[in-house]
Every structure is written in C-alpha cells, then in structure tokens.
Amino acid sequence: MASFGAGIGARIARGLCLLLVLALGASRVSAQNDGPLITSYGYAAFGKLKYPAGFRHFDYVNPNAPKGGTYRYANTGSYDSLNLINLLGTPPLGMVMIYDTLLRRSSDEPAGRYALVAQSITYPRNLAWMDFHLDPRARWHDGKPITPEDVIFTIDATKGLVTPGMKRVQTAVARTEKRGPRTVRVYFTAKNSPTLPVTVMDMWLLPKHYYQKHNLYAASLERPLGSGPYKVGKFSAGRWLEFERVRDYWARDLPVNKGRQNFDIIRHDYYRDGTIANEAFLAGNSDLKFETSAARWDTEAGLPAFRSGQLRRENIPYSNAAFYVGIVMNTRRSFLSDREVRRALMLAYDFEWSRRVLLKGHHGRLPNFFSNSEFASSGLPTGRELALLNTVRDKVPPELFTRPSSLPVAGNWANRRANLIKGAQILRAAGYRMAGGRLLDRQGKPVTLQLITYSPLIDRQVSLFIENAKALGIAVNYRSYDTAQFRMKLRNYDYDLLVNIPMFPGYETPSYGMTLMWGSKAADMPQQLNYPGVRNPAADAMLSAMLTAPDRETTVAAMRALDRILLWNYYAIPMHHNYPAPIGQMPITYWDRFGKPAKQPIYNFPFSTLDTWWIDPAKDARISRGRYQ
C-alpha cells in the first residue's frame, strides 16, 4: 500500500502541475515519439465500446420507426435569445438539437461515443493528440460542407464569453492544426488523460462562415445556422418555439441516428411555474412530463383521462448520477465561509417533516453529491480511495477517516429541538453570540441571509428551515426571481443561500466539467457552476487525480474521495431526491399516443425531445382531437 500511495501522490503532483499549466495558459504538446497509432470508428474513455464496427443502430431504438407528427413539451420560465453558445441572454431548452458534434455518445453505456461529423479518429496510445477525419457528407443546413476550419473556429470560440459546457473545451486543448482537406488535429493539454478527447468530441460545432457575419457573443433572436437533425422554426419569443425536423438531414441514416428524431415538429411551450405547466399538461396541451412531486397523484388518479388509460404513468430506469437538490451555501460570504456555521445550518433543516407533510412520503433524500452512481462514497475510505485521501490528510476534517458521513435526523419536535440546541452550541463555540434573540457576527452585527430561488413554489420546502434558522438567531429572507433575473444572480454568485433545482449534474465519464463545479479556479470565475464557491486544496487534488487517472478504478476512487470531501465540508444542505420514486427510477406521465422501443436509454433519457419514440396512429386516434385544436 505504501508504494501505491507514493504512486498516487506522484500522480496528484503531476495533476496539480497540470492545473497550474492551465491557469497560466495552454502549452504546446509535441506530436513526436508518441508511439503506435490507433484508428477507430468510436472512442471509449475507459473500457471497451459496446457496439462493434459496422453496427447498424443503437439497441434502444426502433430502426423502422415512422416519421411524422408533433411532440409538445411544457417548460417553466422563459427565454430571450436563440444563441445557445454565449452567456448573454437565456436560450430555450432543446437548442442542442440544431447542432451536430464530432462524435455522438450512446445512451446505454457510460463512456462510448461513435462516428458522426468525424467519420473516424486517429490517435497515439499516450493521447497527446487526436486526428478527426470529417465525413465528406457532413453539411450545414445551408448546404455548405463542415470543414476543419469550422472545428478550429469552434475551439477558438471557446476562449470567449461562452457557456461552461463550451468553456471546458478551452482548458482541454493546447492547439489545433489542419492536417488535410477533411482532417483536423487537436493537441491536448496533457498526455495519458482519457477524458480530454471527450470534451472535444461533445462540443457543439459552429459554422465559421456564418459567424463571420454574425456576432457569436451577442444575445439574439435571429435563427442560428446549425447542422443537426432539427432547425428553429416558428416561435414567439419567451412563450413558445417549434423545432422543425430537417428532411434532408445529412446524417439521418448513420448508425447513431437510425430510428431517432422521429417527430416532424417538437414544440416547447413556456409557462410561469410548474403548477401552470402541470395544468396545461392535464388539459392536453403537452404530451409528457417527468414527475418531480407525487403530492397530486391521489387526486389525479380520479381524472377521466387516467381512468380511461389515455394518461399513463410509469417509471423509467436511469443510471445517471442523480441531480442534486438542496440549499447551497455561498462560501464567498464571510459568515458562510466558516465550516462550523455551515454545519450548524445543516441542523436547521428537517427533511423528515418535509417528506411527511409536503411530499406525502414519496421522496427519499440524497446522501451524496453523486448519488445513484459508482462515484458515491459510503462507509469508511479504503483501498485506492484511502491512498488518495492520505495524500491530503492534513487538509481534510480528521473525522473523515474515522466515521462515515451522515445527515441530521429530525421529524418530530424533540429531535428538532435537540438539533437546534446542538446548532446553537456549534455557533457559540465558533465565536458567535446571541443578543436580543439575534445572532451577532464577529463584528457584532446581526446575521441576515438571503435565500433565492427560481420559483415561488419552493417557499413551502424551505419554510421550516427559515423558522429553525430564526431559532438560531439567523434571519433568512426568502425571494424568488423570474428566469432572467435568477440567471443573472447565478452568473454573479449574488446570493447567500440558493435553491436551484436541479444542480450539480453528474457525469458517467467525469472530465474538466467537474473542475467548473468544484475547482478553486472556477470559484473566482463568474458564470461558472461552482455555486458554493468551493476553494479547497483537497478537492483540487482529487480533481487532479481524476483528470490524470490512468484507469477507471483510479477515476472512481478520486471521485469518491471528492464526494467525501464535499460532504464533510457542508457546502450544501441536501433536500429531497428530484423524483418521487426509488433512486434510479424516473417517473413520467404521458398521453398514450406513442410507440416506443422495447428498451429505453438508461443514460440521459430525452424527455424534452423524446427522440426514440414515435406517433402510433392507432393510439393517436383514440386521443381526443380537441387536444390540438
């Protein structure tokens, strides 16, 4: 174990050097002496590809699915821009459908990607660089070919004011080079890092010729040019938008697309909040919703549409890490930068009461930041995870090594009172004092926190927390914002406490995206995903170990160690699991007008596009025509 721990320490040191290089600027990576080359139709960051060369379609589609009809989906909020790439403005959900990527990931394996715009790839075993050989058939919607210049332009564009999903490309790429009329080489910022190529494979490709005449970094309601299976059709800004299937889509018969994108129109309607969107669904104005609350189920069961079978409810298995739902504490604020303060606030949240009274007993609680994945920690650290944590032993709470992380349990008056007494003791020991029923900070000023969210419906979920915080002498002011205002608050980290549902998405193949959520560098960068403002050297070390991991086992160990570090630093108060079903299952309700394949995708179920389902004429005929009039 000692020799293994030394090896882990060396890898972490190399990883920290990598992050330093990224902070100072991308370095040039030599393409010489990189060893034997591999050419492939796909790529798996770890393990082997599920689908062999020459496969015809994914297992979770019907390759003979008919095309046609309209799928309607209800969103909450609004949008004011059709520019998905930049950070100015709020784009509509679903805009990714208009863009192709170099490779397309499958949704029934954790790390597999297959040829799309890149017909094949070539790379050395040390992954210093990768050649993307573009399909000569690849076209933009205006008929112009997709070229190496477009790929290079897209990568260069990530240096500007772009979304976090695109910004991570910049940190993965050292430089690019056109190697032929249809080949572009991408040099990575580090060798032997299997997740770096994934960052480039997944980026949305942008047309250079289009953006020579249009401002990529401006919010705009002008329809952008793409190359994907859909394009923007009719819309009313902020209210609704239709995506039209591209009939002559160049990649419609590729294995990654066969049996998918079956609707002629995908329409997204926007409603002020979830209650109105639910009423619109029950009235027949949208086709499917994923359930985030079971409080209405008993009442809805008596509706004629449910009794007749026109409305169906079922659970879809999923293997994604669960979205984290909780109250994030912004450590950029002086008061909340104190770990003991955050520990005391954890004791003010009574999940058991919320589950019993508000959620009708249907929801569980998320014990981890990466629940429902192999990256969730449990018990005490052992093996590779322990070896990693030993390298940062002086930078983590000592109890991390002696007892498993656990959440406070309340549920009744006695337990709640005991938790609040303990919370008050923690605050007093940390140097805070009470005066006139108010907690005073170290400057003698009363403590007041603002809790923000995107929906007024969250007020019930946090009502008891606000009352309990008051018992600790802390005034918590609650406010909900509309979509544009809320997004601006997030971009500038302008809050003390935050409920943003959902947040902290997990990745089956974690890469640089994790550094945008948990890395110290991202804490000081506006418009990233590090909502708690984590600046933790131990977390940085685990991110470095993950980025430089030579195998899946080390990746898993580093992520579990990261999860444990985050839990013991109390960066957020976990609320309920986002779905009112056992973890690993997503309940959906839909109007029974669809055909669907025998198997469903287990990663990233496409609820907003439903792109593996299709209209079944016989079923559709049984649904009242009045729904769409």
Image (spheres, rainbow, N blue to C red):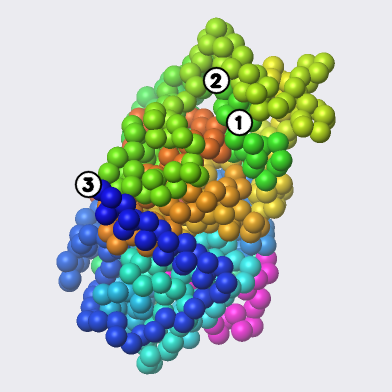
Which image quadrant is residue 618 in?
A: top left
Task: Tell me the SS state at disc 2.
Answer: loop
Identified by mark 2, the residue type is Asp
First-in-chain label (1 vs 3): 1
Q: Residues within 10 Å of mark 2 (few under 14, many from 20)?
A: many
Q: Which mark is residue 598?
A: 3
The label nearer to you, 1 versus 3, is 1
Residue located 33% across and 60% down the image: 549
> Where's residue 456, x and y in %?
66, 33
First-in-chain label (2 vs 3): 2
Which image quadrant is residue 143 in?
A: bottom left
Q: Which mark is residue 43?
A: none
Q: Which residue is mark 1?
A: 340
Residue 307 drawn above or below residue 621: above
The label nearer to you, 2 versus 3, is 2
First-in-chain label (1 vs 2): 1
Whether 209 is among the magenta residues is: yes
The residue range painted magenta reads 200-219
Question: Marks 2 and 3: CB-CB under 8 Å?
Answer: no
Q: Which residue is mark 2?
A: 350
> How far is the residue under mark 2 from the one under mark 3?
41 Å
Residue 604 drawn above or below residue 162: above
- The answer to whether one can see residue 561 in this image is yes
Whether 192 is among the magenta residues is: no
Q: Residues within 10 Å of mark 3 (few under 14, many from 20)?
A: few
Question: Which secondary structure type mostly characterizes the magenta part of the structure?
Answer: loop
Question: Marks 1 and 3: CB-CB under 8 Å?
Answer: no
